[in-house]
Image (tube, rainbow, N blue to C red):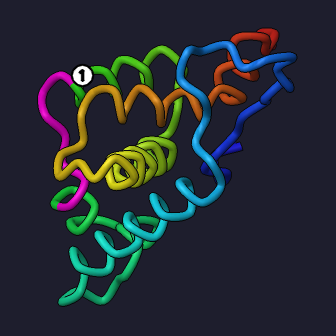
Amino acid sequence: MDRIDLQVDVPRPKEWPGSTPPLSSKAMRDQVYAAQTIQLERYRRLPIRWNSELFGSYLRTHAALDKASAELLQITLDSLGLSMRAYDRILKLARTIADLEASADIQSRHVAEAIQYRQLDRQYIVTEEPL
């Protein structure tokens, strides 16, 4: 399971639950293009172009977390028993979520959302029977 970035089971809602309607396809496409532009600009002098290509020191530099976000991610990794590979994937995903919001910094809400996309890890670990 560690090699899959997004793992989400999404049931189809009968009606939209929130007061704010969902993004239109065009608005979502525009948001993605804006995030791509942010990434291309951020990495223009590096041998990478996208957040998915971040590794090692590039990942630690361009996806740095504040103390609260780092603690949230560490608590999650410890409680779910996730690997460092999972840590890196969550970090890359949080960086992308921040880019989609045009946020220069990764905030706790970005980390929390990225963690939610690892829900199948949580389901697997929680339901796993001890040997």
Residue drawn at x 46%, y 70% is: 33
Percent across and percent down for residue 123 are 73, 18
Percent across and percent down for residue 42 are 21, 74
Q: In which quarter of the image is residue 96?
A: bottom left
Image: 107 above or below 102: above
Q: Name the residue under label 1.
A: 71
Percent across and percent down for residue 10 are 78, 29
In terms of secondary structure, where does tag 1 sit?
helix
67 inside magenta stretch: yes
Left or right, residue 30 beside residue 42: right
Residue drawn at x 72%, y 34% is: 8
Residue drawn at x 60%, y 29% is: 21
Segment colored magenta: 62-68
Q: Which amino acid does label 1 sit on?
A: Glu
Left or right, residue 43 beside residue 27: left
Q: Front-most of 101 and 74?
A: 101
49 inside magenta stretch: no
Percent across and percent down for residue 97 are 41, 46
Q: Front-most of 40 and 16?
A: 16
